Amino acid sequence: MSDRADRFEWNGGHPALDLVNTLDERPSQASIERLATYPDLVQFAELAGLIDRRTARRLLRPDGRSGSQIVKRARKLREHLHDILAAANSGRRARQSDLSALSAAIKAAHAAQVLETSASPGLARRRWLPSPSADIPLHACALAIERLLVDEERKRIRNCLAFDCDVYYLDTSKGQRRQWCSMTGCGNREKQRRRRSGGRSLTRLNRLE
Ligand SMILES: [Zn+2]
């Protein structure tokens, strides 16, 4: 788990958007679930930089607890965020039920952290309590979602303009004119499609801008 040669989609540029993108091929009938099991969730959280390797290792020790309910809650959290982003992308307001569900998860995540003294630099650091707790990767995802929705960076959230792609990403390009989740995937495909259709664009409107 030390590199990113894995099955997750890392074009989001933010852990919470990478989380949304763990349901791969989303607009199609044959979407691919990348968070199928609890170990998937732990691996995602580690690779996304949300939990450290030591914590991940401890969480993956067999202890008789399947974690299936926890990964199910993580998928629900992901879908609440997706619905909020999709609403914004369609020019609609987010549903209060989605925001309330995220608020409850974020509150629980904050309640699972305490401050403790830290070696220099800094005055204190956060620690999960109790640790290890199987909920930690779920809580870490909730806090990433909170950061995404309140930070200034939220203004750079985009939805890939390819008509058959629903990947969300942060546009950190200099001119903020990035249109595709990846140039090697959707970007090239769309360029070829335009050539075949005589320059006609089949892209969608991105209203998150
Ligand atoms: Zn795309």
Image (cartoon, helix red, strand yellow):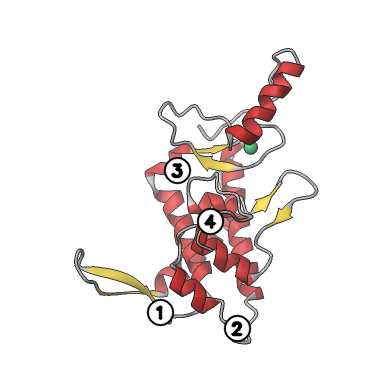
Q: Which residue is mark 4?
A: 99
- Which residue is under mark 2? 62
Labels 4, 2: front one: 2
Q: Nearer the viewer, mark 4 or mark 1?
A: 1
Residue at horizontal 21%, vertical 64%?
122
Q: Earlier in the sequence, mark 2 or mark 1?
A: 2
Contact? badges 4 and 3 (CB < 8 Å): no
Q: Is residue 103 visible?
A: no
Q: Position of residue 205 (x, y in %)?
A: 62, 28
In the rendered image, which residue does mark 3 sit on?
A: 154
Nearer to me, 204 or 188: 188
* Cβ atoms under marks 4 and 1 closer than 8 Å: no
| Mark toward the viewer: 4 or 3 | 3
Q: Label 3 is placed on what type of residue? A: Arg
Residues marked 3 and 1 touching at CB (< 8 Å): no
Using a 10 Å C-alpha cutoff, classify the residue at mark 3 as few (fewer than 14 neighbours), some (14 to 19) or many (20 or more). some
Residue 71 picture quarter: bottom right
Dot 4 beta carbon under 8 Å from ligand 1: no
Residue that numbered label 1 is attached to: 129
Residue at disc 2, CB closer than 8 Å to ligand 1: no
Marks 4 and 3, the one that precedes in the sequence: 4
Which class describes the residues within 10 Å of circle 2: few (<14), some (14-19), or many (20+)?
Answer: few
How far apart are labels 2 and 3 at the CA level? 38 Å
